[in-house]
Amino acid sequence: MRITSHADNLMTIRNLSAEDAPTELSRLIAPGVLGFYTHFEVTEVFAKQNGHNPAINVFSIAVAEDRGSEAVQAPALLNSERIKLKSLAGWNFGVMRYTQPITELVPSLEVLSNTGEWKQSGKTLCFGKVVALTPSFVPPDTATPVPLNHVLKNNFWNGSHLLEWSSQEKVALQPLFDDPRRLQELSEEVQKCVPLRLASLSDRLGNFLLQLPVTVLMSRFGRSQKNDGFAAKIVWHAKAKPRVLRANCDLNFDGVVVGYMSSAIQSPETLLPMPSNRGLHRGVIWDEENKIILADTGPSSFINTISFGINMVDPEPRVFSTKQKDGSTKSYRITLLNQPIKSIVGEPESDANGGWTRKRIYSDEVAKLTKERRFVQYKPVMGKQQDEHEKALEDIRLLINSYGQDGVWIWDPYLSAHDILETLFHCKHSGAALRALTSGKKAPENLSILEGILIKVRFYWGKLKNWITGQQKLNFADMQRAELENSQCNWHGLNLEYRIKRGTAGWEFHDRFLIFPKNDDRGALAWSLGTSVNMLGSAHHILQRVDDGQLVVDAFLDLWDQLDKPEHLIWKKP
Amino acid sequence: MSASKEVLLGVLQEAARGGDELIPNELIAAVLNQPEPIKALSDHDQGNLFFEAIRRQFDFIAFLKVTEQCPSVENINRWASLMRWFIRELQGWQLSNDPKFHKLTVLFVVSAYCDWNGDLWAALPDGAEQNNDLLHALERLIAGIRSNVVVRGLGSEPIWEREVVEKLKVADMEKDWLTISELWPSFESSIIPSVFQIQAVRCLYRFGFAILVGALNGASQTILAMQFAGSLSVGQRLALGIASNNHYIQFGSVYQTFFHWPKTNQLGHEEQQSLKQLLLRVADDQLRWEKWMHVFNRYPLRYPAMQQALGEVLAITSETSIIAYIESISLSTTCDGSRRSVAECLRAFRNVAQSDRAKLMWKRAYQRWAQWQFDLDSEDKYLLEIGCSELDYAIVAYVIECLTERERDEAIIRLTDTLRSVDNTWHASLSDCIGYWNRLLSQFQTYAHARQSLSSGEDWLMEGKYYLPYEPQNELYLPMMFHVR
């Protein structure tokens, strides 16, 4: 690897070649350049196949560290028992850890480059043919998390230089790529020993990483005291000899650079004046003498405003019960939350463009979100429709409790009292305005032939019984009221209005929606259910968020307001 | 002594000199109007009618209660005449003459009207202790009292209230003192003991203590135990707890004492001794002691006035009592929590305990502290600054009294080395890493303070300062790395 400097001080990096590597690596690990490394710690995740030797590298990382005069740590397995995956018979995995003197680093990497084998633990670890990747500098996680940090060690401060040798073919690890669940399972097991999230970086499987964390100084970019820019603070390591550094900081907002400053660091705190402080900033500390980065914040931001709400849990729960298809009764107990007390701490960022820029960015965000087509698909397996129905209902309840603080409306031509009990009654937000709109249509059911016959027999038997006893048949609204009243509910915190489209008022409707009217924190939201509530999960359908919830809200209100005569009201609480 | 109490004692002295009696006729007329006078006295409206009747005849007494202004000589004489009538009637009361308790009700309304926190009963002359008829009638009445908690009589019954009542009933049956103590604040304000009950308990305490103890031996409801205890002064109720074998009465006498006890007030010497005696009785029963510790020692901050007696008891009870004491404390990393209260308890313990017993306490505390590791097992909790613990005093004591100088020095070196290589250990996040640093630094405090205490004689509880394994003026690197404030 060579990091060269042009006349304009821009850093360029070219691929590490076998010839350059020893020299450049020796330069970087020299005391005082990036740190005062005395050892390197190796963590190997290896695989063994029954009857095969030697071990295959799954992932290995070496980290240069200052361990003073500490004796080297002999190789030790971190997992007491070999990791075995349920879905991969004949394989087992292990995690090995040990340290070596830093002087061993360059020779051992030479062996790796030349032979595709790593032998520092005393046993051979096979990589196959390795190719050096472009070296990089990995900043710590800030506003934008860096995926590589999932597999680096403690990259929390200045950042780390990273050298990487890729096992490009990865043939031996093919079973892990064939079924991602295997990798997930392995990753979870490995994390019990060491925080390496392998599954999140499957492209790095089979590779060898060398992490050179910058510890020669400690740095921090923060707002200046007068809030007129940024301040770069640095503290040198006790053993370091201070040298000339440069702090660079750029500020990006809405895709353009709105501030930039570069300044020599001559004191523990260097001011980088900036006219504006909106957007994401990125601070870099550049070592003039060694032509390397010593710190990079990555895109970062400061918290200006925090909005939070405090909900009081209502000690009184809502209880009710519903009749199940098999005739049994299912009881529910919903813990209710009172309306939150909202608070905002801090001053919101001002928009010098009269708020227009903020509005446009918000619109862009909405447009971006609408392209994401967030949806859930339900594909019930024959015989397990009820399970899938329950799962779909749980999803609906989750949405209701996530967004229903200021109201939840269900719009479904086949909606029934039973459906309302299974959905809106589960709303935990006490007093939230719940609305239900139906056409009173008989809900289609996904029945077997035998179930269909049984229902018809029951229907005609009921008619016959009514004829014999002279009882009048209850109409739809009466039956709805009866079911709600018989739900043994205490009505606590319930604010529900249930209307029906009947007669000439309004218009016929066919689509089904779950709607959340807008509130102070967000715009209106709506989900297309894709089927009636009664059929959720029972047959194939897609639950999908609607692009513009407000349009659905407007349409709902248009119809709701027209259905305002007494004959349209089925039931209301309180 | 308050001015009103002084007046009361003067009235009783005057009454003892002999003279006329003044009968509370209006009160007697009001009480005779009621077929069940004890029940009527328990009723808020009816009871007020009784007190209104006596107030009309002796309004200066109510005025004294409010203003603390001394009544006129004439009124003092009238009051003394009333007291002469009261004392004679009390001493001569016969069940056969008062089968419906009309007279007894009148007497207890008079005593309640003239009483200041039980001062009247304590100052009454001897005599009534000879009245077995009176004492046994009161015994039967008290032994027959039962409480029944019902959820709101009007309107729909809130589910949560019904569940809380049920929970209390179950806890009461199982003598689950912890649950009872957690539920008690929900009930306490709505429970108003009857005037008759309070006066009967005070009367029996004054004239028939053994009979009172016997009457309460069958008590099996915490609510009643709290009410009985609440009828008596702190010293009296602790004495009752010592004399009684009833677990409800014993728990009620202590819990009722400390439930409302001002945090800055201390118990008097006699009260301390009574509490100690009562705690010693409980400590004889290991299971009961554990239950008590879960109530009174989970958050010692709630019971500061209890600490000295508790410490002295721990110095002489069994080893298992010490274990229960240590295990019952809810450990937290806050430096403003219960650590001062625990230190107060352990100072009292240390003053009395033999050396081997003290070491036993320190070792048990260290075991718990070392296992706890400043909430290491709590996944969602990060230690973002140096933490303390309720056991700090005991841990410093352990380092001083159970470790050799060499062991102390080695521990400090080990911690210092580990602190300097925190970044060589893998951490899942920066918060984890900072938490680890602060956990080590928190452990470091106790060892460093022990060394400081040994050299300077400072108190074993570290307060208002921190120890750092580096010179803060010269070391800036580590503080920036670990966000040291």
Image: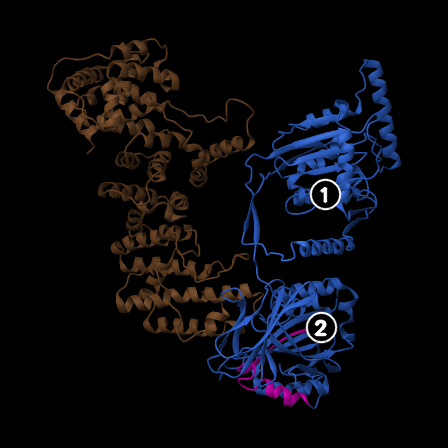
Chain colours: A blue, B brown
Does residue A427 sit above or below B94 in this rendering? Answer: below
Is residue B107 something that shows in the picture? yes
Image quarter of the N terminus of chain B: top left
- Output the chain of dot 2: A
> Label 2 neighbourhood size at 10 Å, few (<14), some (14-19), many (20+)?
many
In the rendering, at what x and y percent does residue A298 appear?
A: 62, 69
Task: Residue B399: name its quadrant.
Answer: bottom left
Q: Distance of mark 2 from mark 1, alpha carbons?
A: 38 Å
> Label 1 neighbourhood size at 10 Å, few (<14), some (14-19), many (20+)?
many
Q: Residue furthest left?
A: B17
Depth check: give the residue in front, A347 or B49: A347
- Output the chain of dot 1: A
Depth check: give the residue in front, B264 or B404: B264
Check residue A204 in the rendering and tell me which mark sits there, or answer none: 2
Does residue B243 sit above or below B145 in this rendering? Answer: below
Question: Is residue B383 part of the magenta span, yes or no?
Answer: no
Magenta residue span:
A20-46
Does residue A138 sit above or below B3 in this rendering? Answer: below
Image quarter of the C terminus of chain B: bottom left
Amino acid type at mark 2 = Arg
In the rendering, at what x and y percent does residue A424 appear?
A: 69, 36
Q: Earlier in the sequence, mark 2 or mark 1?
A: 2
Check residue A396 in the rendering and tell me which mark sits there, or answer none: 1
